[in-house]
Image (tube, rainbow, N blue to C red):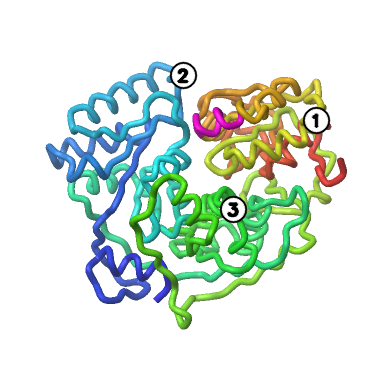
Amino acid sequence: MNITEKILSRASGKKEVRPSEIIEANIDLAMSHDGTSPPTINTFNKIADKVWDPEKIVIVFDHNIPANNIGSAEFQKVTRKFAKKQGIKNIYAHGEGICHQVLPEKGYIKPGSVVVGADSHTCTYGAFGAFATGMGATDIAMVYATGKTWFMVPEALKIDVNGNLDKYVTAKDVILNIAGEIGSSGATYKTLEFHGETIDSMDVSGRMTICNMAIELGAKNGIMEPNKNTLEYLKNIGINRFGIIKSDKDANYEKEHSFDVTDMEPQISCPHDVDNVVGISSIEGKQIDQAFVGSCTNGRLEDLRIAAEVLKGKHVHEDVRMIIVPASAQIYTDAMKEGVIDTFINAGAIVCNPGCGPCLGAHMGVLGTDEVCISTTNRNFVGRMGDPESYLYLANPAVAAYSAIKGEIRNPQDK
């Protein structure tokens, strides 16, 4: 079996499972945030009085924090009341950061575990060798009530990535390149299992970026076998008790894809589909109104560092708004200690509190008609960041920063 099948067989109490088999799995951890908790709670209240295990539920306020309108404030009020009533102590409601960054930082994610969340980018946790997937509010309500859910065991695609990344080419470019090849629906309800020397040598931040965007190819989950950087990360936050699960050498995959990233230039996902990917040389010169560095895809310290490296001693173009949102309070604190935040402010960027920020088009940095943004987020659908007639280009943090300086999409390798 492959790693996903092994995890699901353990969770379902079976010796083995196979693709397309329907199983009932025990859940190790469930999560919802300020936007998805109220509909989850509404369904939960119709089917149960008590959650199955308050210690295995985590709630994070990140999408609209601080509340930006009355509706958001009411959602958060309902969620706080529910958590208190149910004895859920694992609630982060004071700007601790984005759920997909906070959960790993706080030690909730372990290799081999089954994690579900009321957010599509829950697949991020596959970077730690966990089976992690997003679900709707009704399904999460059932998990909150019973600690179980059903899955159809997914087919798996094996993704081999080899080669060395050039300067200012990052994990974001790797996953955008993969998306351009496989397509936004090419992995629908499948596992994306990442292998290869590039993946094996990658830091935790980059591995999270790649698994984060598995859903953008339609995948049920993205997953990697933990490498030495992952194990070191877990050790440093005090997580020692877990088992590492690896795919069998003769595991079956529906299909295998190989990618060589040697000499790959920065990749750009153009409006309005994530798989509309081109090399940056094909799109250079496109004028922009806004640049954003942040989100659960690229708001980690490593991302902020690379953006600061590009911005140091420079200034954001007079016609561009640049917004920086650290993915967590811990990242914000570390960035301040390193002088990264000072670099952003001195360059004329706006630094906001940890959270999802502009990514969902509901809080800060909303785009107006015909405005163009280059962003380190994961989606560029019509209206994703504001007006339906705005345009969103996805890129890595170095590209976003250099483009902010130049006022148009530009390659930081030329600086």
Point out the residue furthest to the right here: 414
Tag 2, which secondary structure?
loop
Q: Left or right: where does residue 90 sit relative to residue 161?
A: left
Q: Which of 101 and 378 is in front in this view?
A: 101
Q: Element at badge 1? A: helix
Q: Decide which of 281, 294 is in the foreground and name it.
A: 294
- Tell me: 144 left or right of 342: left
Of labels 1 and 2, the one closer to you: 1
Q: Name the residue under label 1.
A: 405
Bin the neighbour count of mark 2 within 10 Å (Cα to Cα): few under 14, some 14-19, many 20 and up. Answer: few
Asked if disc 1 and disc 3 are in contact, CB closer than 8 Å, the reply is no
Residue behind mark 2: 68
The quadrant of the rendering that contains the C terminus is top right
Per the image, is 331 magenta?
Answer: yes
Q: Which residue is drawn at 37% across and 61% down?
A: 112
What residue is shown with label 3? 203
Q: Which residue lies furthest to the top in this view?
A: 70
Q: What stretch is highlighted in magenta?
A: 328-335
Query: Between marks 3 and 2, how big is the CA–CA gap?
Result: 35 Å
Q: Compare residues 297 and 182 and report the one nearer the observer.
A: 297
Residue located farthest toward the left when viewing the structure as drawn:
49
The picture places residue 409, in percent across and down from the top left corner, at 79, 39
In the rendering, at what x and y percent does residue 196 appear?
A: 61, 69
